[in-house]
Image: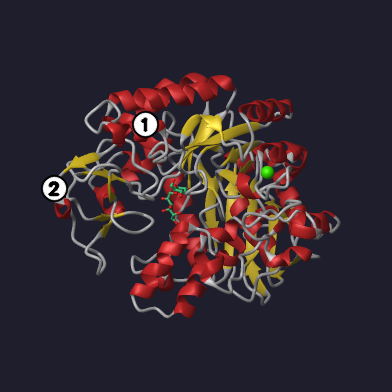
């Protein structure tokens, strides 16, 4: 693997709407992000991905863009964006924007012009079907529920494709004129000083054509639109072109949001001359998913979690550099997902942090994760904002699931869990806003907030700071960044342990992932304890007795 400028970076995701509000309108903004750069720098962050803040009706919270060349006034102005880039660069930090080009907003000028003249230039920017027999359109179900086909406004016999919400019409990547427009826009931002991108839902830009129906997978006679991805060939043509025209000339960093990739595609995706610099490991994210609905999702045990991440590490190691996460703006809080219910505590949060953060690849922290923010308890479906969760709720009720069970499933998996405002301190609205936040603050903010954790050396926050410093330390950096990954004690129940090895040294990351203590064999003598989440490290004769929820990072003797 060729070394790259970004390999040793520590990355952070900001969901701008919920990060920091400076003008009291209840919506986080760019000046808010600028005001927290010093905080992030101190945490050890080098690279920041900001979820979309382009002009948007916010039907899908910014993942529906109406003008790629402007910032939404609710988030700020282009001048704020320029200031953010300058302030970040001054601190030797990089800024990534979200590249949402599978679709745009139905309020984008292109789509409005397509409605005016479906057969004209802009009609060809989208997938429009001209038919008097809509029942013959293919039976794909959109990610957010319902058919992917919607009547084109102002027309009785034209339909447009949307694999996400109906306010997110898919862009037709087969059309070279559309691709030119996209590349022009990407280069406009990169020339402006942007350092790279997170590529949204990128695998969807290639459709299996011509459109055709598949066997239904639910009673609605539809099939998930991901079904067509198995048959879609040739995405590399688009991705390679975009890399060569945009990212490569700028030496930009890119991380792909890639689901459903084929194993054979990995080298093309993140090999040395890959389409992307990196891509996220979603193997644990998608564990237990069910086509039937959220209520049918299987919980993930610590052993399942270990098996997922270890398999991914092995699959990726010969190819490239993966991006490791425990949560993002589409997922419940990682601590509520990967720690068994009833065992969530500062100790277990630190264990989870240690385990994922030191895997081979880029560590990503999602806003609030560094203080161990948790899911949001729901009293009623009325409280839910997430369009995807609302659809799932409907589907569950239609399938005969009780309201209570459906609500509990939404509570567990809703995307709102990650979207409640950042808990800065114990004052009103957790210090996020002086107004009314667009989504309520998690009531646990009075206890769980950054200010409190800053004053507590044993806090989750201080642990994350230790982790970033460990990965950057002169002593261990090369091993923790470039070293190989090797599982240890892979068959032991509730143990997650692995080696990171380089020519220079062998490190052992080891976690007792349960409440009860357990004694485990050590593969060699301990040279140094590099990190420890408990009060002591008890070793006797190549054995270690670990407390409940304890993680250690050990340097071993040669
Ligand atoms: O998500 C794409 C996507 O495929 C997810 O909805 C995924 O299916 C789900 O999270 C799996 O658990 C991206 C954005 O991250 C999301 O916020 C947007 O809503 C979506 O694209 C549309 O732009
Ligand atoms: Ca604001």
- The circle on residue 132 is 2
Quadrant housing residue 295: bottom left
x, y percentage for residue 478? 64, 37
- The circle on residue 289 is none
- The circle on residue 110 is 1
x, y percentage for residue 515? 66, 75
What is the secondary structure assignment of the residue under circle 2?
loop
Q: Residue at x 41, y 63 (%)?
A: 391
Considering depth in this image, is 516 or 544 the residue closer to the camera?
516
x, y percentage for residue 189? 53, 25
Crowding around mark 2 (Cα neighbors within 10 Å: few <14, some 14 to 19, many 20+) is few
Q: Is residue 377 visible?
A: yes
Q: Residue at x 41, y 36 (%)?
A: 101
What is the secondary structure assignment of the residue under circle 1?
helix
Relative to 265, residue 253 above or below: above
Quadrant housing residue 46: top right
The answer to whether the beta carbon of the residue marked 1 is less than 8 Å from any atom of ligand 1 is: no
- How is colour applied across the structure in the image? secondary structure
Residue 543 relative to residue 306: left or right: right
Residue 63 relative to residue 145: left or right: right
Considering depth in this image, is 315 or 30 the residue closer to the camera?
30
Q: Residue at x 48, y 22 (%)?
A: 187
Crowding around mark 1 (Cα neighbors within 10 Å: few <14, some 14 to 19, many 20+) is many
């Amino acid at each position: 693997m060729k070394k790259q400028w970004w390999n040793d970076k520590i990355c952070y995701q900001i969901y701008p709407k919920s990060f920091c509000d400076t003008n009291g309108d209840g919506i986080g903004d760019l000046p808010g992000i600028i005001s927290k750069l010093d905080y992030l720098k101190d945490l050890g962050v080098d690279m920041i991905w900001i979820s979309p803040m382009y002009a948007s009706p916010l039907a899908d919270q910014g993942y529906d863009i109406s003008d790629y060349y402007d910032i939404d006034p609710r988030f700020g102005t282009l001048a704020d964006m320029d200031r953010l880039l300058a302030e970040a660069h001054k601190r030797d930090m990089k800024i990534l924007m979200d590249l949402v080009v599978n679709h745009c907003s139905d309020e984008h000028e292109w789509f409005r012009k397509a409605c005016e003249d479906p057969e004209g230039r802009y009609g060809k920017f989208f997938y429009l079907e001209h038919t008097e027999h809509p029942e013959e359109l293919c039976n794909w179900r959109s990610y957010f529920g319902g058919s992917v086909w919607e009547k084109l406004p102002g027309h009785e016999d034209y339909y447009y494709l949307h694999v996400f919400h109906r306010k997110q019409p898919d862009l037709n990547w087969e059309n070279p004129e559309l691709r030119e427009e996209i590349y022009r826009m990407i280069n406009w931002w990169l020339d402006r000083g942007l350092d790279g991108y997170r590529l949204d839902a990128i695998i969807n830009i290639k459709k299996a054509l011509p459109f055709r129906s598949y066997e239904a997978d639910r009673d609605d006679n539809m099939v998930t639109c991901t079904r067509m991805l198995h048959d879609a060939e040739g995405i590399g043509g688009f991705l390679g072109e975009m890399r060569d025209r945009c990212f490569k000339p700028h030496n930009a960093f890119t991380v792909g949001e890639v689901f459903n990739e084929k194993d054979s595609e990995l080298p093309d995706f993140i090999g040395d001359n890959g389409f992307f610099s990196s891509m996220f490991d979603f193997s644990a994210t998608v564990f237990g998913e069910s086509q039937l609905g959220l209520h049918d999702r299987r919980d993930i045990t610590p052993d399942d979690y270990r098996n997922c991440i270890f398999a991914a590490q092995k699959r990726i190691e010969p190819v490239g550099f993966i991006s490791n996460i425990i949560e993002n703006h589409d997922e419940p809080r990682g601590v509520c997902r990967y720690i068994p219910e009833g065992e969530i505590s500062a100790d277990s949060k630190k264990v989870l942090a240690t385990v994922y953060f030191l895997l081979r690849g880029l560590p990503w922290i999602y806003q609030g994760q560094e203080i161990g923010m948790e899911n949001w308890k729901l009293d009623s479906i009325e409280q839910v904002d997430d369009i995807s969760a609302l659809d799932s709720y409907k589907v569950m009720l239609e399938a005969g699931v009780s309201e209570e069970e459906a609500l509990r499933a939404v509570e567990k998996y809703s995307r709102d869990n990650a979207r409640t405002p950042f808990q800065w301190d114990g004052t009103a609205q957790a210090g996020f806003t002086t107004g009314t936040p667009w989504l309520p603050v998690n009531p646990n903010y009075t206890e769980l907030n950054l200010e409190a954790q800053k004053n507590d050396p044993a806090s989750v926050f201080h642990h994350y700071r230790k982790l970033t410093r460990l990965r950057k330390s002169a002593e261990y950096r090369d091993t923790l960044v470039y070293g190989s990954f090797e599982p240890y004690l892979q068959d032991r129940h509730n143990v997650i342990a692995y080696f990171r090895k380089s020519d220079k040294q062998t490190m052992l990351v080891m976690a007792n992932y349960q409440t009860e203590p357990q004694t485990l064999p050590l593969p060699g003598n301990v040279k140094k304890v590099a990190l420890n989440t408990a009060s002591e490290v008890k070793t006797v004769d190549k054995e270690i007795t670990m407390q409940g929820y304890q993680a250690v990072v050990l340097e071993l003797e040669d």
